[in-house]
Every structure is written in structure tokens, then in C-alpha cells.
Amino acid sequence: MPNIDVVIIGAGPGGYVAAIKAAQLGGKVCVIEKGELGGTCLNRGCIPTKTLYASAKLASLVSNAEEFGLEVKNAKINFTRVMSQKDEVVKRMTGGIGTLFKGNKITLITGSGKIIRQGVVEVKKADGSVESVEARNIIIATGSEPANIPTFEIDEEQVLTSTVALELAELPKSLLVVGGGVIGCEFASIFNAFGCEVTIAELLPTILATEDVQVTRQMRLFLKRKGIKIVTEANITAVNKNAESVTAILESGEQLQAEKMLVSVGRKLNVEGIGLEEVGVKIADGRIAVDEIMQTNVANIYAVGDIANRFQLAHVASTEGIVAAQNCMGIPATMNYNTIPNCIFTLPEIARVGLTEAQAKQEGYKVKVGRFPFMANGKAVGMRETEGFVKIVSDSETNDILGVHILGPHASELIHETALAIKLGATAVDLAHTIHAHPTLSEAIMEAAEATYGKAIHVFS
Ligand code: FAD
């Protein structure tokens, strides 16, 4: 019998969290990582983008400093410093995982892992040597990489993935963002706030197509107001480059030119070369198929994170990692996807939990909608951040909260109160009857809940 309880391939938020949880539960744990601890999230995703977002938000606030009675002379972006402080943050966070691994006595092997048979993972190291790790359980957490578009080449010089866009040495004068999804719109907001001329080209009729329609409509207006050009139904048929610029030719004949182009059209899952075929792990819709305990069709082989779910969010990966680790350690646990908050770090932010109004109607609910604008919220007015609203979609018969959508300041922080409300089965009336401190942005949630039955105090309904 192997004396290792769990071997984990990949140390992103799915893998490293699974490792720590299994170790906390008394397991002997080994992690195999071919790159850096923290995976996409800490090195090329959540953390670097949100650090840049913090600089972008500050730049945006400083540009309105006079409104606050603050005279700021000659404020300008030092892009080199913006990027180096981002690197410092990434280093600090990934270093923190190393410390947690040591503290939890987790063995880390640097190299590329491949399952060669049930219970055995082979690791190829950079020096060419090979090591086999035998364990009672395997968790696959190999994550994803930027996807590309077959119609043109990503040269990582002028046409970039998000990974390389996060390493730019100089701020481009102009940026064409191909793909108006979450990653595309976040980069568009950030680079726009730094003073770069930004265009978004989106194939679909709308940007941020997964969001509530009122949120996307309003967001589109806000982005345009900030000077971002948005071209929807933009089917790029060719890309021409010269020394100074790159030009996308659209099917419509329109040409979009910029100094750099960022391709953010989705993610390719790391399912190849990890031994799935060798042990017969099933793939469905391009992802590893798992059950509610995160186990694949092969006993004692689990899969978590981007490779196994459609959400592609760090917190989903981590929660799945915890569920898999518990099951590996003999503690039954199941994954529940009902109340997953989804946040978009644009300026202003977007956050959602539960169903959109359209989805709720499609599912047969009779809905009531309560909306409350930040324009009518004292804290937001004082902060000069009045763009957006809170929208609550509730069941018209039971008042159950079906979905919450926040577009506005600190939406990514505000959403959790409503996620908890949905998880605990609180109704819109319960939310409305919960006293919220004044003056806070959270009052907008209370008032949106009141608005579901036409009784918000600070708006006419
Ligand atoms: P990953 O983080 O991709 O980690 C997988 C790890 O496995 C990597 O370290 C890789 O090197 C390693 N690996 C792969 N194959 C092997 C192998 N054969 N052997 C050994 N190691 C291997 N999500 C959010 O929730 N919030 C955000 O704000 C957010 N922002 C994002 C911004 C950007 C630009 C991007 C690209 C993503 C963002 N995400 C965000 C998504 C988030 O980063 C992912 O959902 C998350 O990282 C997935 O975690 P994971 O553990 O499944 O995989």
C-alpha cells in the first residue's frame, strides 16, 4: 500500500487548496507542479489583473480629484512601476503558498505529471530525470491556458494573449481587445483608465453575454462614456500587421487598427498529455467528467478546477479542491453550484449570484424585480460613484430570491450578503427587514429588496 494519501497534479487554486485541506485532515500529500505555485490565478489571472485594476481605479479616482476638493498636479501613469508593483504582489502571494506547503508538510515536486496507471503518477523533471509517485488517490488540477483563434496567429509581439499582456514593458497607445467577455472587458477597463485608446471587438451581438441584459446594456453605455469603442457582431476574417500596428479586417468590411491586439476568446483546457486515455478517464464537452464528489469515472481519481467545470473561477476551483480532498480523506462531501458569486472587475464593477431575470422566466418562475440606483444612495453620492444599480429578481409568490445583479462601486464585495441570503433561504422581505447601517453601499441592497414589492424609501416606484 502506498503511504501517500493524495497526489495532486497542478498547484493552482484547485490543486493547492486541495493539498492544504488534505494535509489539515491528516493526509500525507504530494503536489506536482510544472510551473509556479498558484497557477493561472496567482501568476497570470486573478491576482495580477486585480492588482492592475487597483492602479486603474486609483487613476480613475485621481482624474476626478478636483470633485473631492483635492488638487493633484501632474498625476501620470508610471507604467513600469505599475507593472513592477504587480510583480511584487504576485511574488508575495505565491511565496505565501510555499510557506503554507512547508507548514502543512506537503511535498512539492517540480515537473510535469502524467498518470501512468491507477494510483501512479510519473513526473518528468526539467533535468530530464523521471520520478514515480504512488498514492491512494489522485487529484487532477491542471487548469487551462489562453485559447487561440484559427483565423490568425498569436505572435505574442503585436497579437497577445492575456498572459503576455500582463508582462508588457510599455503601455501601448492603443489596444484592440478581441472578445468582450469577462477577461476582455476587464483588460479594456484597466488599459482605458491608464490612458490607452481601447476598442473591443465582440463576435456576439452583446458584450458580457452571460450577464443580466440590463446590466450589459448599462455597462456598454458606461464603457462608451469612458471612451472605449465597442464593435459587436465583429467577425474578424483577417489580421494584417506592419511595424507600427495591427489591423483586424471584419466580415462587414470595417477595419479596426491598434498598436497591440489582445485575444481574449476563452480558455483551452489542459487535458492532453496527462495520461487520461491511459487510465480511461472520461471527457465530456471537452472537460473531465466528474460526479458530485468530484470523482471521475475511475475510482480514486478526482478532477477539480477549470479542467472539470464550466465556471472557470478560482473560488469554484478551490471549493471543488476542498470537496475532493475531503472525499480522499474519507470525509463525505458534495459540490453545490447553486450560489456561486461571479464578479467582473470593470470600472464600475459587476457582480451576480443566481439567475438572471431572463433565466428565471425561462425556468418558469413568475418574477418580481426590484431595482435601486446608486444615484439614490448617500454613500455612493459621497464617493462620487453613482453609476449603476442593484437588481433583485425574486419569486412573485414566495419572495424567494432567485438572482441578484449589482453594477456599481464595490459590487464584488457587496454581492456576498445576497449569496448568503440565497444559501440560507432568506426571502427578499428578510433582506429588506434586515437593518443596514447608514450610510453604506449595502443599503442599496436593502432598498432593492424593498423595491421588489414597491416599497423602497428613496425612489418612487
Ligand atoms: P490553474 O490556475 O490554471 O492551475 C493549473 C496548474 O497546473 C498550473 O500551475 C499549471 O502549471 C499546472 N499544470 C498543468 N499541467 C500540468 C502537468 N502535467 N504537471 C504538473 N503541473 C501541471 N477567476 C476568478 O475567480 N476571479 C478573477 O478575478 C479571475 N481573473 C482572471 C483573469 C485572467 C486574465 C485569467 C486568465 C483568469 C482569471 N480567473 C479569475 C480564472 C482563474 O484564474 C481560474 O479559474 C483558476 O486559476 C483555475 O484554477 P485551476 O486550479 O483549475 O487551474
Image (cartoon, helix red, strand yellow):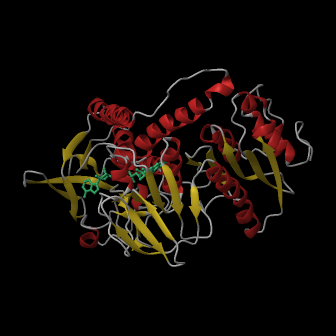
Residue 343 visible in rendering: yes
Residue 288 visible, this orientation = no
Give the residue at x 71% y 50%: 404
Residue at (30%, 60%) from the top-left corner?
Answer: 243
Query: Quarter-wise, where is residue 264 in the image?
Result: bottom left
Q: Position of residue 322 (x, y in %)?
A: 44, 46
* Horizontal and vertical percent position of residue 221: 68, 54
Along the line of sight, the residue nearer the viewer: 284 or 344: 344
Horizontally, residue 92 falls left or right of residue 74, namely left
Left or right placement of residue 201 versus residue 397 in this view: left
* x and y, in percent, of residue 380 in the image: 72, 33
- Between residue 218 and residue 114, name the one nearer to us: 218
Q: Quadrant of residue 66?
A: top right
Furthest-top residue in this view: 70
- Along the viewing direction, whichever of 327 and 98 lies nearer the viewer: 98
429, above or below 434, in the image: below
For image coordinates 56% across by 49% down, the residue present is: 344
Q: Residue at x 37, y 42 (%)?
A: 42
Closer to the camera, 106 or 243?
243
Relative to 398, does residue 70 appear above or below in the rendering? above
Can you give x and y, in whole percent of width and height, for residue 420 in the image?
A: 66, 42
